[in-house]
Every structure is written in structure tokens, then in C-alpha cells.
Amino acid sequence: MTSRFRPWGPLQWLLPKLPIQQWALLGVLGTEDRCTAVLSVMDQSLTSRRFLKIMDPHVSPGESIDNRLNVIQRRLVDAGTSVQDIRTVELLENIDAMREELELFLANSGPNIVFDISSMPKWWSFPMIRFLMESDRVETLVVTYTSALSYGRRLSSDPKALGRLPTFDEPRVSDRYDEVIIGVGFAPLGLKDLFEENVGKIRYLFPFPPGPPNFHRNWHFLRSLNEEVENRALTAEDRWHVHMYDVPSAFDALCKATGSGNQSCALAPFGPKTLSLAMCLFALAVDGAGKEPVHVFYTQPQRYALDYTTGIGSVDGVADIKGYCLRIAGRDLYTL
């Protein structure tokens, strides 16, 4: 692994340091306040924008979610977004439909992209990051994440069975995983099924400091998983603490745990979207190095709570939006 500088930090600090004046934004129109946060920073520098309204299955017309989506849409329109730039898509779309949405966006975007994952389900964000990184039309790519003020007590419901995320399920030579690395989140839905695979070592990426009261939910995640799984008792050596916003350090931790991808591994991104971003980038880096594919397991919810999050986090009175440079002037920063 070659050490390299991978710029990241508050978006308001990061963007002026890049030699780019015009950007295209791809984001989500969802029920969360933080869907609109990036526009408060980037409105004047955007040449195009596209928001995906990702609809959960089996939502009945007239439910309160419709009212909430209309509120968020009005905020986007008031901030200069055309209704034509909002696309309604299904949560569990196949990869062909996802790729088509990205191609429609890139056809009018220009080469410098900001991709906001704050409210994007992992079923979508993981393949979309792959497609963006595979596109030679993308010269510079920045991923953004906005923190929330608070999370609901129950975040989601009706989860699918544990399975592999789209495009991270390629056939492998061996059915054994030397390493399984789990991102610690709030609810280990179906995760115990992964322990039934042919696995050598199991490790945990623990977001630290997660900030109160979220650390209680992280520890509950570990306790409940430890109680459900026999002969897999958690030890301190298996738990790696990584700052939840430090994507480069999380990527480096994954490299260290797997010998830069030389050990076969599977990932389970149940933790914060920032650490999940690091997992996604690591799996792509392993693919790019021609090593055995990394499988990414997840229990995708089919319904998200209306109060999944509320509010927009702030630091010193400014919206807490982190930006992560994945590619600058055609040079990929997360490689092996």
C-alpha cells in the first residue's frame, strides 16, 4: 500500500482548495432535512443538478411520507432545482436501471461531480460509486455527507434477507473468507447469518467517537450480536476504533487487516455511511488491483422511518457537511 494524501474535511473548507469553479451535483430527495444541506454551500457553483426520489416498496398513496417528500421537494425547488431535475426511482432497482440513471445524469453534468450520500440507501450508493469511478467522463469526484441532529428510535423495517449488494457479488475462486469485517451500527439485522459462512477471522470497525447518545446504540449492536452467535465471542483485539468521519484512516485500516487485499475478505457495512464509503472504496480498490473480489453483505431495509433523522448537524453555526475527494484531475486516490 502506498501512502498518499486524500483530501477531506468540511465542504466549505475543501471546495475552495480545488481548482474547479463549476460542479454538477447528484443527490437524493428523501424525508430527511439534510437532503438539502449541500445546496446551501454549492448553489452558486452548480451548472447542473439531479435529485433521485427513491421510493420504498409498498408505500400507499396519501401516507404521511408523501407530505414530507413534498416539503423537501419545495425546499429544493426554492433553492433553484427544476422539477425536471427530480427523478422518481424505486428503492430496489436493478443495476441496469441504476446505470441508466447515472448515464442520464452524466450526459449533462460536465466532468466535475459532487455525489451526496447523506440520504442515499446503500443499495444505491455502493453501485453508483462504482459506476462513477469506472466512468472516464468523471475527472474529479467528491462525495459529501451531512450529519443530522438526531436519529429516530426505529430507523427502518421490513428488511430483506442478508445478501450481497449489487455489483459487489462477483463469483470468487474460493468460498472461504480469511477476514470478515463488520461496520458497527445501530441494528445488526440478519447479520448473524454471515457467521455461518466459511470464515477465518471476524473484525469490527467501531466508529469512535460516535457522539452521545449514539455510542449506546453501537455497544448494544455488539452485545446483541455477541449474544446471538455461538463460538464467536468478541475480544478487544477484534474491535478497531476509527473516527467515524475519517474515511482515509478507515480505508487504511481495511488494507492493514487484509494485507492490502491479499487475504480474501467480505465486508458488512452496517455502520455510518462514512465508514461504509471506506468499505466501498476498499472493495473497488481490490477489484482494480486484480485480486479476488470482495463481497459486500448487507440487510437492505425496504421501509425507512419517516423520522430516520431530524435536523442538520452544525459546527460553530455552520452546517456540518464533510467532503471526500475520491478522484482529482483524473487521478484516483483510493487504490492499492
Image: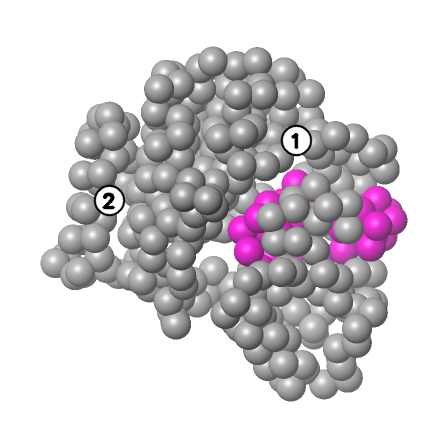
Rendered view: 228 above or below 5? below
Q: Badge 1 is on which residue?
A: 7
Judge whether residue 280 is colored magenta.
yes
Residue 8 shown left or right of residue 20 in the figure: right
State which quadrant residue 306 falls in: bottom left
**Residue type, mark 2 in image:** Ile
The image position of residue 205, as x and y in percent, is 69, 60
Residue lying at 31% horizontally and 62% vertically, measured from the top left: 307
The image position of residue 212, as x and y in percent, is 52, 67
The image position of residue 236, as x and y in percent, is 79, 73
Query: What is the span of residues highlighted in magenta in the rendered image?
Result: 254-283
State which quadrant residue 325 falls in: top right
Rendered view: 14 above or below 240? above
Residue lying at 76% horizontally and 50% vertically, measured from the top left: 254
Secondary structure state at the residue bearing disc 2? helix
**Residue type, mark 1 in image:** Pro
Residue 176 shown left or right of residue 13 in the figure: right
- Label at residue 72: 2
Secondary structure state at the residue bearing disc 1? loop
Number of numbered discs present? 2
- Label at residue 319: none
Nearer the camera: disc 1 or disc 2: 1
State which quadrant residue 156 falls in: bottom left
Residue 137 shown left or right of residue 303 in the figure: right
Closer to the camera, 8 or 224? Answer: 8
Q: Is residue 54 visible?
A: no
Q: Is residue 63 visible?
A: yes
Rendered view: 327 above or below 314? above
Quadrant of the image for the C terminus? top right
Residue lying at 62% horizontally and 60% vertically, measured from the top left: 209
